[in-house]
Image (spheres, rainbow, N blue to C red):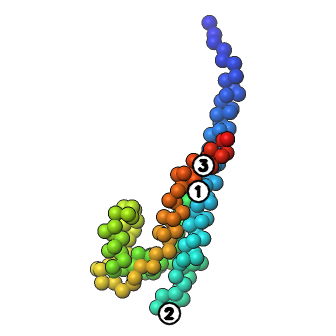
């Protein structure tokens, strides 16, 4: 005895098409969000410190990973020991201490800030440019992805 399911091949093709629509929608939103973070961070990054010019703005970029399903946005660091761009983001004293004690920040952000915290007496006051751009542009990320998927499937 054999069972034949009519239309199964067409249904499977339709499911594959739906899956690709969802993946493409997610990739589009992630790419757009990464670009928005990059632009805002560049706009807000300091161009000088203590009268000395900085080239942080020129080194902020986005890098695609996992075939468009992941993005990294940040500063391409020069000297890993003297990372002025991170010190300017987090500060070396009070600013870093505030980040470390603020539950609003994720553990990942606090771990990064901890790397640049010195002894609480540092004189670099944080002038965040990357983290605010990240928080602002990802606040509605899940909703944006859902809306894009619904739009593309509808």
Label whose residue precedes the other's in the sequence (1 or 2): 1
In this rendering, the answer to whether 143 lies above or below 139 is above
Q: Residues within 10 Å of mark 3 (few under 14, many from 20)?
A: some
Q: Is residue 64 visible?
A: no
Residue 76 percent across, percent down from the top left: 53, 72
Return the residue nearer the eye: 108 or 151. Answer: 151
Residues tagged 3 and 1 counted as in contact (Cβ below 8 A) = no
In this rendering, the answer to whether 104 lies above or below 58 is above
Residue 147, numbered label: 3
Label whose residue precedes the other's in the sequence (2 or 3): 2
Q: Which residue is mark 1?
A: 30
Please indicate whether residue 90 sits to the left or right of residue 60 in the image: left
Q: Is residue 112 visible?
A: yes
Residue 60 percent across, percent down from the top left: 56, 73
Residue 10 percent across, percent down from the top left: 70, 27
Quarter of the image with the N terminus in it: top right
Q: CA distance from mark 3 to mark 1?
A: 13 Å
In this rendering, the answer to whether 148 lies above or below 125 is above
Residues tagged 1 and 2 counted as in contact (Cβ below 8 A) = no
Q: Which residue is mark 2?
A: 51
Residue farthest top in this picture:
1
Label whose residue precedes the other's in the sequence (3 or 1): 1
Q: Secondary structure at mark 1?
A: helix
Return the residue nearer the eye: 125 or 12. Answer: 125
């Amino acid at each position: 005895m054999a069972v034949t399911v009519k239309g199964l091949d067409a249904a499977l093709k339709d499911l594959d098409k739906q899956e690709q629509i969802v993946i493409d929608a997610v990739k589009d939103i992630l790419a757009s969000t990464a670009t928005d973070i990059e632009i805002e961070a560049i706009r807000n990054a300091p161009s000088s410190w203590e009268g000395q010019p900085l080239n942080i703005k020129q080194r902020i970029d986005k890098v695609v990973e996992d075939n468009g399903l992941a993005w990294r946005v940040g500063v391409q660091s020069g000297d890993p020991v003297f990372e002025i761009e991170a010190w300017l983001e987090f500060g070396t004293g009070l600013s870093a201490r505030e980040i470390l004690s603020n539950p609003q920040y994720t553990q990942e952000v606090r771990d990064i800030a901890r790397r640049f915290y010195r002894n609480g007496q540092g004189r670099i006051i944080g002038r965040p440019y990357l983290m605010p751009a990240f928080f602002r542009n990802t606040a509605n990320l899940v909703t944006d992805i859902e809306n894009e998927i619904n739009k593309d499937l509808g």
